[in-house]
Image (cartoon, rainbow, N blue to C red):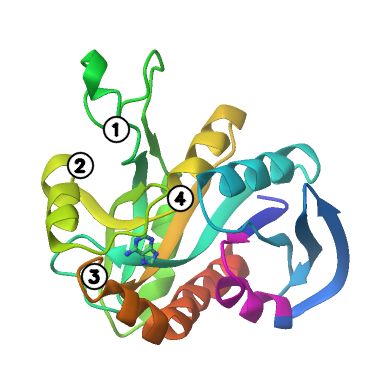
């Protein structure tokens, strides 16, 4: 890979990268600030997409068109859906699905995008395997590969999170990954989503999110930092 796009949705998710970049050139497009430069010897374009699928989609398309990135890595936090995952643990995406895509009224299964061949977008095998192999050395918690579910909803109920597990086999839930995944797939760009759990998407999610987002963001950063040095 040549230039790698690194996306986070929030300040906490990108600031550690920004602090270690050299030769930074800034460019604002569609209101999103892009930082082109060198991170630990690797050419990257870092950006904060903002929260939600539309922000993530627009940001990813700009990474493709304006910056010609060869791969995209998303780094950040998520709510755990797999009951084996604890706060701080890591999910490396196998594939990504929009859990709020709902055309069930017309007979399409939940999560299915009508008239598209694919609704569940597969991560790049090499990036996924790289993420798993580097995380073994540097991270004490669990690292699981699994499905990342995305929707324009902060999930904070046991009932909903149970449904996401049973109906869509999610490992974690967040608000950007599947949009990044779809845009990357449309443009033929390899991607992987790395997420550390800030909460369990249950009744305590809002409290845990506030308390653990900084630590979880750092866990995700540590893995992506190692990936970028070996990519
Ligand atoms: N990001 C972190 N926790 C989340 C949750 N519970 N729902 C959606 N996005 C999240």
Determine if the magenta segment contains residue 56.
no
What is the tally of numbered marks visible in this picture? 4
Circle nearer the viewer, 4 or 3:
3
Within-10-Å neighbours for mark 4: few <14, some 14–19, many 20+? many
**Tag on residue 111?**
1
Calculate the distance from the C-alpha at mark 4 to the C-alpha at mark 2.
15 Å
Earlier in the chain: of badge 2 and badge 3, it is 2
Q: Main secondary structure of the magenta part?
A: helix
Q: Position of residue 151 (x, y in %)?
A: 39, 47
Q: Is mark 4 within 8 Å of ligand 1?
A: no
Identity of the residue drawn at 53% across and 67% down:
227
Determine if the magenta segment contains residue 9.
yes
Q: Is mark 3 within 8 Å of ligand 1?
A: yes
Calculate the distance from the C-alpha at mark 3 to the C-alpha at mark 1.
21 Å
Within-10-Å neighbours for mark 1: few <14, some 14–19, many 20+? many
Within-10-Å neighbours for mark 2: few <14, some 14–19, many 20+? some
**Tag on residue 168?**
2
Magenta residues span 7-18
Please state which of residues 169 and 101 is positioned toward the viewer in this rendering: 101
Earlier in the chain: of badge 4 and badge 2, it is 2
Calculate the distance from the C-alpha at mark 1 to the C-alpha at mark 4.
14 Å
For mark 4, what is the residue? 177
Question: Quadrant for ligand 1?
Answer: bottom left
Earlier in the chain: of badge 2 and badge 1, it is 1
**Tag on residue 200?**
3
In the displayed structure, does residue 117 sit left or right of residue 53?
left
Question: In the picture shown, does residue 213 fall above or below 99?
Answer: below
Identity of the residue drawn at 10% across and 46% down:
166
Q: Position of residue 33 (x, y in %)?
A: 77, 60
Q: For the residue labelled by badge 1, is the local secondary structure a helix, a strand or a loop? A: loop
Q: For the residue labelled by badge 2, is the local secondary structure a helix, a strand or a loop? A: helix
State the image quarter where residue 131 is shown: bottom left
């Amino acid at each position: 890979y040549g230039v790698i796009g690194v996306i986070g949705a929030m300040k906490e998710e990108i600031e550690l990268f920004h602090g270690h970049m050299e030769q930074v050139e800034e460019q604002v497009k569609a209101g999103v600030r892009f930082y082109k430069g060198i991170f630990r010897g690797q050419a990257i374009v870092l950006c904060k997409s903002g929260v939600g699928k539309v922000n993530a989609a627009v940001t990813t398309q700009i990474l493709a068109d304006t910056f010609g990135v060869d791969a995209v890595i998303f780094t950040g936090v998520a709510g755990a859906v797999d009951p084996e995952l604890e706060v701080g643990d890591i999910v490396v995406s196998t594939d990504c699905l929009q859990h709020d895509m709902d055309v069930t009224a017309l007979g399409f299964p939940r999560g299915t995008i009508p008239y598209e061949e694919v609704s569940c977008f597969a991560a790049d095998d090499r990036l996924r395997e790289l993420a798993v192999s580097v995380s073994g050395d540097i991270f004490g918690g669990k690292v699981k590969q699994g499905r990342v579910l995305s929707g324009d909803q902060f999930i904070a109920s046991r009932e909903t999170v149970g449904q996401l597990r049973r109906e869509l086999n999610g490992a974690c839930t967040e608000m950007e990954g599947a949009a990044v995944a779809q845009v990357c797939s449309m443009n033929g760009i390899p991607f992987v989503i790395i997420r550390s759990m800030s909460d369990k998407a249950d009744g305590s999610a809002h409290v845990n999110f506030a308390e653990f987002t900084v630590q979880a963001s750092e866990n995700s950063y540590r893995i992506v930092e190692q990936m970028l040095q070996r990519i």
